[in-house]
Amino acid sequence: MLYWLSYALEDHFGPFRLLRSHALLLSFGTFLAAYLTWYMLPKLWHLMPHDHGKAILGKDGMKSAGKPTGAGVIGTLVALPVILLCAPLSVCDMGVVICLYAAMAFGFLDDASTVPWGQLKKGLLDMVVSIGAAMFLYAGQGGELWLPFFKTVWTLPWWLYIPGAGFLLWFTMNATNCSDGVDALAGSLTLISLVCLAALLYVVIGYAPVAKYLLLPFNPQAARWAILLMTVAGSLCGYLWWNAEPSKVLMGDAGSRFLGMLVGVGVLVTGNPVLVFAVAPIVLVNGGGGLGKLVLLRTLKKFGMEVRHPSVLTELEQAAQSPFVRIIHSVRFPLHDHCKRILNWSNAQVLMRFMLLQAFLTPLLFILFVKVR
């Protein structure tokens, strides 16, 4: 809004043309969203449903019982007017934003439900909004694709781009949701992802001289997406202020689904889906590893292998079970649960070590995927 308004206002006062500065809009949106979320959360979280805890996880799983959850709905709704104010988005871009908020709404309804939604219902709803966002992205961005180690830029047809992009969005959404189990973990890892994506979109993909130097396709809309990503990152900072251990509020599915899908959207706007492994390596391993484990075990079961957990088998069945299956079962997912229960890491150790790993891996993978062409 400010971007378009600047054209009418600069005739009355020349400096209003600065409202067309993407750097100014990005900075203003980030700080405004951070402040508003930090200020509004403690005033509104009493309206949120309360977490029931997870008895299956024992004492640790019940620490969250009674805390307000679903606060992601507050942070995202606070960020929405700031996004509309600062990010000059097109009609197709707004379609993607609507899909993001639909994912948030479905997550909140699940948080508020007395009976948690089943995996099939949640998975199908996630896929619907993911395909919808992929359609809007294709309409607004086109199907241009570039990959690490290749100078060629391909243009994908809609029937190939939309299903592939939809799956990537579905996967990042669910991987982030599965990573939400330690205070500030999913939020902190996603914050690193959003800031890195925004930097790539603003400084590289959205800046013609740098894009040309690196042999990347220039996207004039990339800087506008960087504003949106950083505005949400600001709102996330406001939330993490209150979510630091011991947390006073939880984002719930409302926040984790929105954030996970937004990371996928940012990756697709870059034109290189492989960058998801650079911007969210720990989230993908931590949360997405569980999805991979489930698919692998079900595949092995179709081949007639015994895939049940060794703890429920008799001694004879354990002896007959494949060592490969036992190795798969020896690692718990999400990985943060394995680190806490098997390696005896504290919540603070999980948070710090996972953040360090992602902060270390992301720039190295960026250099590998972007520079080596």
Image (cartoon, helix red, strand yellow):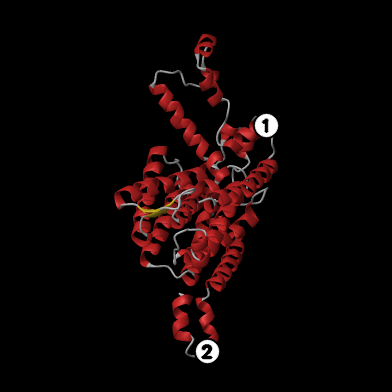
Kindly state the secondary structure of the residue where label 2 is placed.
loop
The label number, if any, that marks residue 13 in the structure image: 2
Residue 266 picture location, percent across and down: 48, 56
Q: Taking the image as drawn, is residue 48 in sight?
A: no
Q: Which mark is residue 343?
A: 1
Residue 272: x and y, percent? 45, 52
- Between 263 and 218, the one lying in front of the other is 218
Residue at 52%, 36% (x, y): give it: 289
| Marked residue nearer the N-terminal end (1 or 2) | 2
Q: Residues within 10 Å of mark 1 (few under 14, many from 20)?
A: few
Which one is in front in this view, the residue at disc 1 or the one at disc 2?
2
Residue type at the position of mark 2: Phe
**Spot occupied by residue 262 in the image (x, y as percentages of width and height):** 48, 54
Disc 1 on helix, strand or loop?
Answer: loop
Residue found at x 58% / y 60%: 41
Q: Tell me what residue is drawn at x 70 percent, y 41 percent.
A: 349
Residue 130, position as x, y percentages in the image: 39, 50
Horizontal relation, residue 346 to residue 71: left or right: right
* Residue 343 in the image: above or below residue 256: above
